[in-house]
Structure formats: C-alpha cells, structure tokens
Amino acid sequence: MTFKKKGNSAEKRTIAEVNEKIKKGDVQVLTAEEMKKLVESSGVEVAYKEVDVVTTGTFGAMCSSGAIINLGHSDPPIKIHRAWINDVEVCHPGAAVDLYIGATIMSETRPFEYGGGHVIEDLIRGKDVEVRATAHGTDCYPRTKLSTTLTKDDLNQFYLLNFRNCYQRYDCATNSRDETIYTYMGKLLPRFRNATFSGSGALNPLMNDPDYETIGIGTRIFLGGAQGYVIGEGTQHDPGNRFGTLMVRGDCKKMDPEFIRGASFTKYGTTLYVGIGIPIPILNKGLAKKTTILDEEILTDIVDYGVPRRERPKLGTVSYQDLKSGTITIQERKIRVSPLSSLKKGKIIAETLKSWIENALFYLSSPAERLPIDTNLKPMKQTEEIPFVNDVKHTAITCTEDDEIRAVAERIINRSINHVVVTDNEGRLRGIVTSWDITKAVAEGKKKLSEIIVRKVVTTAPDEPLETASRKMAQHQISALPVIDHNRRVLGIITSEDISKLLVR
Amino acid sequence: MVRILLRFSEKLVENPITAQVILEYGVPISIVAAHIDSQGGEILVEVPSAHVDKVAEAFREKDVIVTFPKLIEVDSKRCFDCGACLSLCPVNAISFKEDFSVVFDQEKCIGSPCGICVDTCPARAIRLVEKHGLV
C-alpha cells in the first residue's frame, strides 16, 4: 500500500472535506480488511492521518425486506383490494395502485420455492411478470378485475424499502434434536452435527461504527448494487447488545441482480439476499480505532434452534474468527459450521464501494439525524397463555428390556394404557412398546420383549410448546411421545388423548 | 478413485470385456452399479485415479463408450457463494477457496445416494444429475 504524502494532520476531518477530496480524486479509501492490516503494521495514528474512508460490506438473507411499486392507473381505473404478481400475493397498503412486495410472501402455486424475493429479483432482471388484481368496484374506481403483464420499465416507482436489514451480528445456530430441522438459519442436522451463522463479522457496516457516529438517517450507502439510503434504525434495533439494524431504501430500477437475490430456505420459505455496503468516514481518531475491530473480537452465542422457544438455550460463545474457520466446538466436539451470508460478496461490495468513491461516482452524505443508541428489544405482550408439554405430561408406565411380553401386557391392561416406555436401569429411554406391538407379538408367537421394542422413538421435552409436540405426533402418525431431559432420562409421557382433553377444557 | 461410466452396445454384451481389461492391465476395477441385458447396457465403475487414463483407453479400444459422469451440477450463475452447503457434505466435497468462492469436488461427491446439499441451497443452484439409466 502506498499513500500520498500530506501536510500537517488535522485533529478532525469533516464530510465536506472528504467530499472535496473525492472531487479532486485524491481521497484515500481502504476496505475494512485493508484498514485492519494497515493499523496492524503502522498503528492507529498513521491510519487516521492517511485514511479518509473505510468501506464495509455484507451480503445475506434479510427477510424483513420488500419493494414498493406503483403500477400506474388502468382504464377504467381500479382501486385494488387484493393483488398477485407471479402468483405471489402482494400487499396493498395505500391508495389505488400502490403495492408492496414482501420478500417472504410465498407463491400460491409454488410455495417455499418462489416468493416475493424472487419477484423483486425477476423485476430487477428486466423479466416480464404477471399481475392479477381484484377489487370491490366503486363509482370512481369501477373495475373489479385486472390482469396484465409488465416489466420494471412499466412501473412508475420501484423502490426497495426494507424495514430491518444489516444485523450487526447474529446467533450461531445448531440443533440438539434427534431429527433434521429446517429453519431460517438453514438445514440443521440432528444432534449438533452441523451449525450455521450469518453476517460478515469484522466487515459488517455497523460493527465498524458501533456508536452510530456517521451512520444515520440520510446516510448514502451501497444497496443492491446501486446507491441507496439509510432511512432510520431497523425494527428490533438493539445497539446496546450489539444487535443494531437498519431501515433502508433504494431505487430497484438501478440495482444489479449480482447484489440482490431471491432465495428459498427449504420448509421455511422465501427471502431476499441483500447486499449492503456503508462508507465510514474517518472523522476522528476514535473512528479509526473502531474500524480496526477484528473477527476474533466479535463474539456471538451458539444457540440451540432445536428448542422452538423465544429464549433458546445457549450452548456457548464463539468468535467470527472461529465461525469463518469452518469448525467450532460444541460440548467438546468439533462441529462443522457454514455461513449463510456470502463472505465473498461482502468483500466484493466493500471493494466496489471503494472504487466508486475513488472514481468520484459516490459522495458521502452527512446524516440528517443520528440513530437511537438506547433502544432495546422487548418481547411480545401476550394476553393468552400457551400450554407447554410440562403442563400436561403425566407419569410414564415403564419397563426394562428384560421384562417378559406377558408382564408388559398385564401392565397395559391393569393401567388401561397403550404405551409402555422402555428404560435402562438409570431411567434412560431405550424404546417404546405399544399395545399394538404386544398384540402383534402374540399373534406371531414372539416371546422376547427385545424383539418387538420400537427403538427409534420420537420424543419431546418439558419446555416444548404443546402445539409442536402435537405436530410431531401428526407428522409421524403416532399417539404418544415420551418426555425426556437432556440426558435422555424419561420424565413422563404425553398422549394424543391428553391433547384432546386440553382442547375441550 | 474415479468413477467412469461404460456403455456397451448390443454387439459387445456377449464378450467378457471388463474381465479382460482387469486381467490385461492388472488394475482393480470395482463395479458400483450395472445394468446389462441382450440389448446392451451400462456399468458404473470405480478405478484408482492413477490408472484412469489407461483403463479408459483400454475400454475404448474394445469399442466401449467411456464417459466420466458428473454426479452433481452447480449453476454458477445462481450460486452466490454463501457456503450454506459446506457443513452438510459427509465426504467434504465442498469447500471454500481463499476468496470464499465455493468449490465442488466432483471426484469426492457421491451423488444421488446422498444429495444432502441440494435442498440446503438458498439459491437453488445445486442439482443432482439424473441417474444414467442404471437400476
């Protein structure tokens, strides 16, 4: 890296001064990665003197995204009640022909595979889309039905309007359950066999300006390959816990599908991958220091997504350096970990933004207002209580593998139950036997219990919502689930009867 | 090991060609899947990497059609290099290059018996190549 010599270093820089340098073509821009290397070799003092702007970048799944479009008026005119684009229902929040394409809304004909995110991408690519709409019909807007084909060129406005993007960092997700689960954090294999994470770590925009000194309302940014703006803090903005978010807006007609993509998470749904890059002007020495944050200094929790609760169990802490290495340690086991964000594209975004600024294609803007730095995330106020497995579980009738079929059959009759849970001497789950298994064994002349035990048992945990347990029973077409703890010790059982009783209570 | 697909025409089925190649070259060839009848057929075999060229040439000399089947296809235009597939692959056939580009190792991939990566791809860029008519 070589730098142009400068005169006396000023204690502070202004955005106007930086823009003046951009205009003259002698601005010094480094990507956040280059800045970290410079500080390592030459120190913060030199970095502050020499560098005017540090660029950042991230490219990840950002579900709270969407686009506002205006169709123009039809003749005769229509005041849209409901509308669909490529079979994806679009929201109609305003007057006659304004529509909002939500990224996570799924196609009615191809759910989980095609959704609002894909509609946005297809429009940006210049593809034709099919628009359908219905309306009540009024004196001023008589039309009740509409069907047309259009491209982005036919739209009056087509703006990305994302209400929560660019999470500063995110949890690392893994799964304790005995089955693969499909989440918004991707496919998580059973028993901690893999993990996933999101975000670009030390290259994340908000990590490089964590006190929101330069990022505020009106900050010009790289958004989806075009220039966009920060229009506020994002929903759930929680800067104190380093979970800051942004609300952003940008002109989709100028965007590049390389940096904005529809995506599908199996059995979760559709979303939009958004590319965001933010220039951090190095206005003071403190900012120069903050942009040196390293992956190893950014920590996040390993969270068990196998527990479908708001507060999911935390299994440990990892750094983004660990996450980017591809392997982390959970309960003393090495686990492979995948990013969901594209680290490659994050870098390309930081580099692209750097070249825009160097070539005077992009000027920095002073925020009109700072973002709040004291908000936090409140849970939902709930007026209705949700039952959990713990609320309905009862004692399980158990046996061991050595018991005779006859003894187990007697237990089933005496207790008038249908399921006997097989445990070892320490009360840990070994299998399950149903009255049907016993009947079958008698018919086939089998004597030993071990021959008929069902060893692959679907289980539940006390803190699982009853609805989830009930869904498991329906999925596997079974009528009871042993309730177990983390050590597979049997705590009880719940049956479909327990659930039906609860419904009529 | 490298997998190669051998196609036999109707005229060739009578001849013990695979056995001849094994005997002539002394190379172990393991048969992964095979389907042959009087009309002709296909055999998917695994050959040690060092002998692939020699074995392929030997089969070709005996009028067998030799191809190197791709088990997985990645649409590089759709793939945006997130790497969501990396931690799932049981044979470590998927990895990052230094610049975090995702690369697939066709030789390590075991294809359709696995396919665990296919539905994890948010870009839907991964496709298993259809079986080659083998039963």
Image: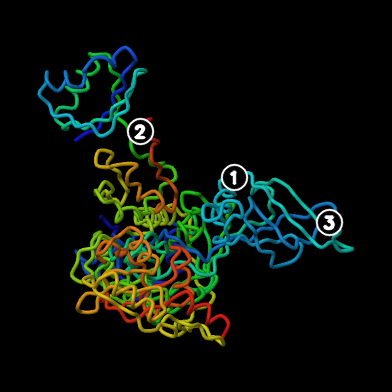
The amino acid on which the numbered mark 3 sits, given as a three-letter code, is: Arg
Task: Give the camera-side residue of A197 and A226.
Answer: A197
- Gap between marks 3 and 2 measured at Cα: 57 Å
Task: Give the camera-side residue of A144 and A345.
Answer: A144
Residue bearing the label numbered 2: B135
Q: Colour scheme used in the picture?
A: rainbow
Residue bearing the label numbered 1: A126
Q: Chain of mark 3?
A: A
Residue bearing the label numbered 3: A143
Question: Viewer-nearest of labels 3 and 2?
Answer: 2
Q: Secondary structure at mark 1?
A: loop
Q: Secondary structure at mark 2?
A: loop
Percent of width and height locating residue A305: 37, 70
Q: Residue at x 34, y 63 (%)?
A: A442
Question: Viewer-nearest of labels 1 and 2?
Answer: 2
- Near mark 1 (Cα within 10 A), the count class, few <14, some 14-19 or many ≥20, is some
